[in-house]
Amino acid sequence: MARRVLGQRNLVFVGLMGAGKSAIGRLVAQMLDIPFVDSDHEIERVSRMSIPELFEAYGEPEFRALEGRVIKRLLKTGPRVLSTGGGAFMNDTIRTMVLNDGLSVWLKADLDVLWARVSKRDSRPLLKTANPRQTLSDLLDKRYPVYAKADLTVWSRDEDKDIIASETVMALARLGRGQDTVPIP
Ligand code: S3P
């Protein structure tokens, strides 16, 4: 049922850095027996640069333009699970594409959970600030009303990843049974 809801569409994970979009997305893809793709990895593959290198060399606007092109292309092939970088859904053009062509899941998490995860690594250019926790908190305030436009919301908390992934699959299945509001094409 959950897989049928998708039809040929991608299940697109959106949400802040540290929400678990790639880890949970990968598990959901396994559960649905469809391929998994990560837009940040795809950006790194086509540019042959890491995300921090891209930000450093070309700046955020160029990164966003590349991100938009990559996601537009990835949305054309489905069904599969597509995990996106945290800023992608904030871009009007990308968000419209995702809402029209995919089925979106916002992996929502609170600040403490996000911070515990992102502070372990040094790979996020946007958090290279004097007070990265505050920066993350500001991003949360700005972005959460926009992420809320996603078709589904799943709480990503400090819990076994398999449980969060199962809850995502169940939310999809509920959609298929008409217990949610998104029309099935
Ligand atoms: C970004 C999130 C990152 C990456 C880039 C910008 C953002 O991806 O795309 O550093 O704007 O939130 P993750 O959400 O996978 O960390």
Image (spheres, rainbow, N blue to C red):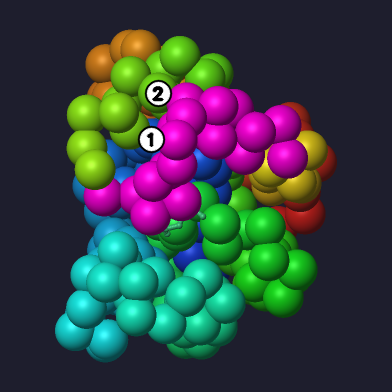
Task: For mark 2, give the secondary structure.
Answer: helix
Give above or below for 100 relative to 163: below
The reply to whether discs 2 and 1 touch (Cβ–Cβ < 8 Å) is yes
Question: Most extreme residue toward the front, as rendered?
Answer: 130
Residue at left 33%, top 12%?
A: 159
Task: Give the dominant element type of the magenta stretch: helix, strand or loop.
Answer: helix
Q: Is residue 130 magenta?
A: yes
- Decide: few, some or many residues near mark 2? Use Cα within 10 Å; few <14, some 14-19, many ≥20: some
Q: Is residue 138 visible?
A: yes
Give above or below for 78 relative to 138: below
Q: Residue 82: x, y in percent?
A: 41, 61
Instruction: Please indicate whether residue 150 sits to the left or right of residue 12 in the image.
Output: right
Tell me the magenta residue range. 123-142
Residue at left 19%, top 84%?
A: 48
Q: Is residue 109 visible?
A: no
Residue labelled 1 has its Cβ within 8 Å of some atom of ligand 1: yes
Identify the amino acid type marked 2: Trp
- Decide: few, some or many residues near mark 1? Use Cα within 10 Å; few <14, some 14-19, many ≥20: many
Q: Which mark is residue 117?
A: none
Query: What is the quadrant of residue 34 in the picture?
Result: bottom left
Task: For mark 1, give the secondary structure.
Answer: loop
Residue at numbered disc 2: 115
Q: Nearer the viewer, mark 2 or mark 1?
A: 2
Q: Quadrant of ligand 1?
A: bottom left
Question: Sequence order check: which comes first, mark 2 or mark 1?
Answer: 1
Q: Residue 99: x, y in percent?
A: 70, 63
Identify the amino acid type marked 1: Gly
In front of the other: 60 or 39: 60
Residue at left 45%, top 14%?
A: 112
Q: Residue 138: x, y in percent?
A: 65, 33
Residue at numbered disc 1: 18
Q: Residue 130: x, y in percent?
A: 45, 35
